[in-house]
Image (tube, rainbow, N blue to C red):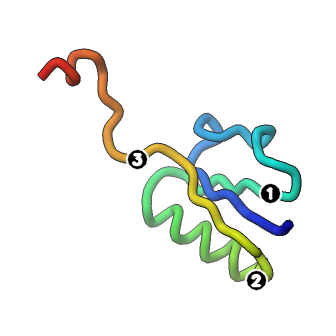
Amino acid sequence: MNCVIFVALAEEFPRKLAPQGYNVVYTGIGKVNAALAATKYLTCNPHVEAVYNYGTACLLYTSDAADE
Protein backbone atom coordinates (compact mmCIF):
# COMPACT_ATOMS: atom_id res chain seq x y z
CA MET A 1 0.00 0.00 0.00
CA ASN A 2 1.34 3.43 -0.92
CA CYS A 3 0.20 5.74 1.89
CA VAL A 4 1.62 8.85 3.52
CA ILE A 5 1.22 10.36 6.98
CA PHE A 6 1.85 14.09 7.33
CA VAL A 7 2.85 15.26 10.78
CA ALA A 8 4.44 18.48 12.00
CA LEU A 9 7.07 17.11 14.37
CA ALA A 10 8.81 13.81 14.98
CA GLU A 11 7.89 14.13 18.67
CA GLU A 12 4.21 13.81 17.73
CA PHE A 13 4.62 10.65 15.66
CA PRO A 14 7.97 8.86 15.49
CA ARG A 15 8.63 7.21 12.12
CA LYS A 16 9.05 3.79 13.78
CA LEU A 17 5.32 3.82 14.71
CA ALA A 18 4.21 3.95 11.07
CA PRO A 19 2.78 0.73 9.65
CA GLN A 20 4.75 -1.02 6.93
CA GLY A 21 4.23 0.63 3.56
CA TYR A 22 3.43 4.05 5.05
CA ASN A 23 5.72 7.00 4.48
CA VAL A 24 5.98 9.69 7.15
CA VAL A 25 6.59 13.30 6.12
CA TYR A 26 7.49 15.90 8.74
CA THR A 27 6.11 19.25 7.65
CA GLY A 28 7.13 21.65 10.39
CA ILE A 29 4.67 23.68 12.44
CA GLY A 30 1.83 25.63 10.83
CA LYS A 31 -0.78 25.38 8.11
CA VAL A 32 1.42 26.97 5.46
CA ASN A 33 4.30 24.58 6.10
CA ALA A 34 1.90 21.63 6.07
CA ALA A 35 0.31 22.75 2.80
CA LEU A 36 3.67 23.30 1.11
CA ALA A 37 5.09 19.97 2.26
CA ALA A 38 1.95 18.08 1.22
CA THR A 39 1.87 19.77 -2.19
CA LYS A 40 5.54 19.04 -2.82
CA TYR A 41 5.26 15.40 -1.72
CA LEU A 42 2.05 14.66 -3.63
CA THR A 43 3.35 16.35 -6.78
CA CYS A 44 6.43 14.11 -6.71
CA ASN A 45 4.41 11.02 -5.68
CA PRO A 46 1.12 11.19 -7.60
CA HIS A 47 0.14 7.55 -7.03
CA VAL A 48 -0.43 7.79 -3.28
CA GLU A 49 -3.48 5.74 -2.30
CA ALA A 50 -4.24 7.39 1.05
CA VAL A 51 -3.19 10.55 2.87
CA TYR A 52 -3.37 10.97 6.63
CA ASN A 53 -2.78 14.09 8.70
CA TYR A 54 -1.71 13.34 12.26
CA GLY A 55 -0.94 15.69 15.10
CA THR A 56 -2.08 18.00 17.80
CA ALA A 57 -4.07 21.13 17.20
CA CYS A 58 -5.31 24.13 19.17
CA LEU A 59 -4.03 24.78 22.64
CA LEU A 60 -2.34 22.49 25.07
CA TYR A 61 -3.78 23.19 28.51
CA THR A 62 -1.94 23.12 31.79
CA SER A 63 -3.67 22.13 35.01
CA ASP A 64 -3.97 25.85 35.89
CA ALA A 65 -5.83 26.64 32.65
CA ALA A 66 -8.23 23.76 33.20
CA ASP A 67 -9.28 25.22 36.58
CA GLU A 68 -10.50 28.50 35.08
Work out which quarter of the rendered image holds the C terminus and state it: top left
The CA distance from mark 2 to mark 1 is 15 Å
Numbered disc in front, either 2 or 1 = 1
Please state which amino acid type lies under the numbered disc 2: Pro
From this view, report whether residue 15 is shown above or below residue 66: below
Q: Quadrant of residue 59?
A: top left
| In the rendered image, the vertical position of residue 42 relative to residue 61, given as above or below | below
Give the mark nearest the N terminus, 2 or 3: 2
Q: Secondary structure at mark 1?
A: strand
User: Which badge, 3 or 1, is on the more N-terminal residue?
Assistant: 1
Q: Identify the secondary structure beneath mark 3.
A: loop
Q: What crowding class fits label 2: few (fewer than 14 Cα within 10 Å), some (14-19), or many (20 or more)? A: few
Q: Position of residue 44 (x, y in %)?
A: 76, 79
Mark 3–mark 1 distance (CA, rounded to whole Å): 22 Å
| Residue 45 drawn at (x, y percent) | 78, 77
Kind of residue sitting beneath label 1: Tyr
In the displayed structure, would residue 41 be above or below residue 34?
below
In the rendered structure, which disc, 2 or 1, sits on the residue that comes first in sequence? 1
- Answer left or right for 29 relative to 9: left
For disc 1, the marked residue is 22
59 lies left or right of 23: left
Q: Amino acid at mark 3?
A: Ala
10 Å crowding of disc 3: few (<14), some (14-19), many (20+): few
In the image: residue 9, left or right of residue 33: right
Q: Nearer the viewer, residue 61 or 28?
A: 61
Q: Quadrant of the N terminus?
A: bottom right
Q: Which residue is mark 2?
A: 46
Q: Identify the element where label 2 is drawn.
A: loop
Which residue is disc 3 drawn over? 57
